[in-house]
Amino acid sequence: MNDFFEDLKVVELANVLAGPAVGMFFSELGATVLKIENKLTDGDVTRSWKLTSEDKNKNYSAYYASVNFKKKSVFLDFTSEIDKQIAYDAIKNADIVVSNYKPGDDKKLGFDYDTIKTLNPRIIYAHLTGFGTDSKRTAYDLVLQAETGFMHMNGEENSNPLKMPVALIDILAAHQLKEGILVALLKKQKTGEGSMVTVSLYDSAIASLANQASNWLTAGYNPKAIGSKHPNIAPYGEIFDTADHKKIVLAIGNNKQFKLLCETLNILDIISNEKYSTNTNRVKNRTELESLLNQIILKYQSDELMKLFIEKDIPAGIIKSVQNVFDEKESQSLILEERTTEFEGLTKRVKTAVFKVK
């Protein structure tokens, strides 16, 4: 599976997260990925995005390493005709170019689609923008989270709006661009023609609002911050403390699961209570229900409770830190390690391609 694209050549002109994540997707699956970085700015800006605990003398950060696996990186100055020609020569033999220039910058540098397709008519030119091809706004994930509804919905009921702790809009846009590239590869296989594939972070974010968008568009409900709770389901997202000071979440999606929950916790009187007999009623009375459940769950040890929930097929989970997650054996197969001349010492990151094809 990891050599599925072994004959594919990708030139990556993108930096930060979304574009490089696309390049890494193909490198994970065996493609040859040449990452071209700007010599005048010391390369991809994320090389300098270091934690205070990182070695300041290394020329990369953990952030940079997260989406730059199995790539060959070269530093070029596109104001130099010699360096520009090096990039052009690579593109002539490539299948895919990934870029994230601001509109206009690609033409100014000579790396826009019209120029590139004269060098390689069969090229698939994949271009990420922030707010679309007509906007020159600088687009960071935080700004997109703010302007597409995510921050407004995220947080506790009385807290300030919060960004998600992962640059999720970048990740979503990367997935959109990968999908577009794969469609373009199918088109090329059928017709022999290249394509230009464009994706904006803005469109990717809006497309990912999913049921929250429909809550407004269909039901007239403007989503707001309610913590981890689900606006349509209860108990779903409420956080409960256990006797050993762990925190557990429940994701009860239907009446059958709610009945099983009550039977498992030996609170049969709640099942017959009309206030909790249907999901609609549970949503309406979720605060009281949360209080009742919390009193019961607080009596259990987390391991004991999770064993019961798993046996009864009741959707629940213990809240874990990232460190806890990577202490689990299930996560070990998802770690990619690399030791190259590019990276001094061993670097680790998680896979971006976790599907299986048989």
Image: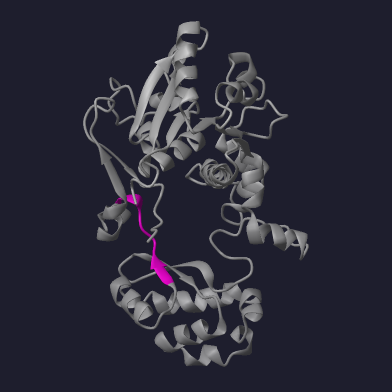
At horizontal 48% and vertical 28% (from top left) the residue drawn is 15
Residue 321 place in picture, x, y as percent: 35, 53
Please tell me which residue lies in front, 132 or 257. 132
120 displayed left or right of 7: right
Q: Is residue 342 above or below residue 267?
A: above
At horizontal 49% and vertical 33% (from top left) the residue drawn is 95
In magenta stretch: residue 337: no
Q: Which quarter of the rendered picture does the C terminus lie within?
A: bottom left
Q: Is residue 77 visible?
A: no
> Looking at the image, which residue sits at the far front?
191
303 displayed left or right of 249: left
At horizontal 40% and vertical 27% (from top left) the residue drawn is 34
Q: Which quadrant of the figure has residue 191?
A: top right
Task: Give the magenta range.
Answer: 316-323
At horizontal 40% and vertical 67% (from top left) the residue drawn is 317
Please tell me which residue lies in front, 307 or 43. 43
In magenta stretch: residue 318: yes
